[in-house]
Amino acid sequence: MSIFQELPVLQGQPDHDHHEHADAEVARPISPSRARQVLATRKPEWLKIRPPAGENYTRIKGLLRERGLHTVCEEAHCPNVSECWASGTATFMIGGDTCTRACRFCAIKTARLPPPLDPREPYFVGESIAALGLHYVVLTMVDRDDMKDGGAGHMAATIREIKRLDPKIIVEALVSDFRGDLEAIQTVVDSGVDVYAHNIETVKRLQYRVRDPRAGYVQSLGTLKAAKEYAETKGRKLFTKSSIMLGLGETEVELAQAYADLREHGVDVLTLGQYLRPSMSHLPVEKYLTPDEFDSLKATADQYGFLYTASGPMVRSSYRAAELFIKGRIEGNRANAI
């Protein structure tokens, strides 16, 4: 069953709210050929990063390659890969390295029919996490619109394997919208996941410009709310989390509305980071925000009642400061339950 049966999500249409704007006010998609005509601007000093290196980085990369695993750190060209891998942490991307959607900000490969899922992947991921000695694990996934459940069962199987090897591990799942399918959402929640994350990516007006047409602002918010409400019916405290990229042409008024919408749908944790253009075929950066601007946006977001807001040029949806906060809250809840 879909949360939004009125949304023709498989036909590549935007949310109904796009039709409320006059044509001149709607943020239209930009083609790769047009994007390439927009010259790249020089990155400011606060966005300069060192290339990944180090003994721990090399060890983790070798371990992942041996098991045929993928990390969003590599696939999405995350600017924090050097810092995170050097400290022995990584965000695993399951379901392969090819997505069925083609969001205009994302560097991950796309195809209508990606390769089949590897049934051994849940075991390999669980084994690798045990070998790395992690305590807080982030699992993300490509969209698998070619599958009936959108890959929810595969995500759930991976989480159960991690929990089987070490029940104390805190698992955050950064999942797709599953086309608004309630059964798929419930499958992930029933796996024992501790944090249910899904990114709205940008403000309402820019959704159709930035994301694949099968995604949508209303649908994304609905999946986050559905996950939390379903967990509550099971007597569980489930943290929900979302992320917004900045520098795509959004306004502070639009961001304030996004904060309000996220809180109205029960989202606990928010991350705000700078959009970085993966290639000349992707959306150009409209603005590089300064660290002071990110601090100001955090102060505003905090007023809406998020349990935690991480905001900064290098912040991404998988960000250690937010993860440490959530880890502390979950471990505290576990201790109180004993």
Image (cartoon, rainbow, N blue to C red):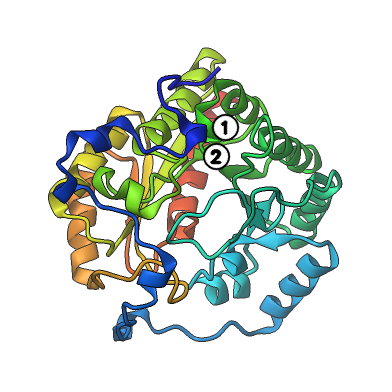
At x 61%, y 39%, the residue is: 145
- Identity of the amino acid at label 1? Arg
Q: How many callouts does the rendering have?
A: 2
Residue 56 lies in what quarter of the image?
bottom right
At x 31%, y 36%, the residue is: 262
Asked if 175 appears above or below 186 in the picture, the reply is: below
At x 50%, y 28%, the residue is: 180
- Identity of the amino acid at label 2? Glu
Q: Is residue 332 left or right of residue 64?
A: left
Neighbours of disc 2 within 10 Å: few (<14), some (14-19), many (20+): few
Residues marked 1 and 2 touching at CB (< 8 Å): yes
In the picture, the disc for residue 260 is none
Quarter of the image with the C terminus in it: top right
Q: Which residue is mark 1?
A: 334
Q: Is residue 321 left or right of residue 298?
A: right
Asked if 61 appears above or below 227 in the picture, the reply is: below
Q: Which residue is mark 2?
A: 331
At x 51%, y 36%, the residue is: 177
Q: Position of residue 44 (x, y in %)?
A: 29, 83
Neighbours of disc 1 within 10 Å: few (<14), some (14-19), many (20+): few
Q: Position of residue 85 (x, y in %)?
A: 62, 71
Q: Secondary structure at mark 2?
A: helix
The alpha-carbon separation of the residues under discs 1 and 2 comes to 5 Å
Along the line of sight, the residue nearer the viewer: 134 or 328:
134
Q: Secondary structure at mark 1?
A: helix
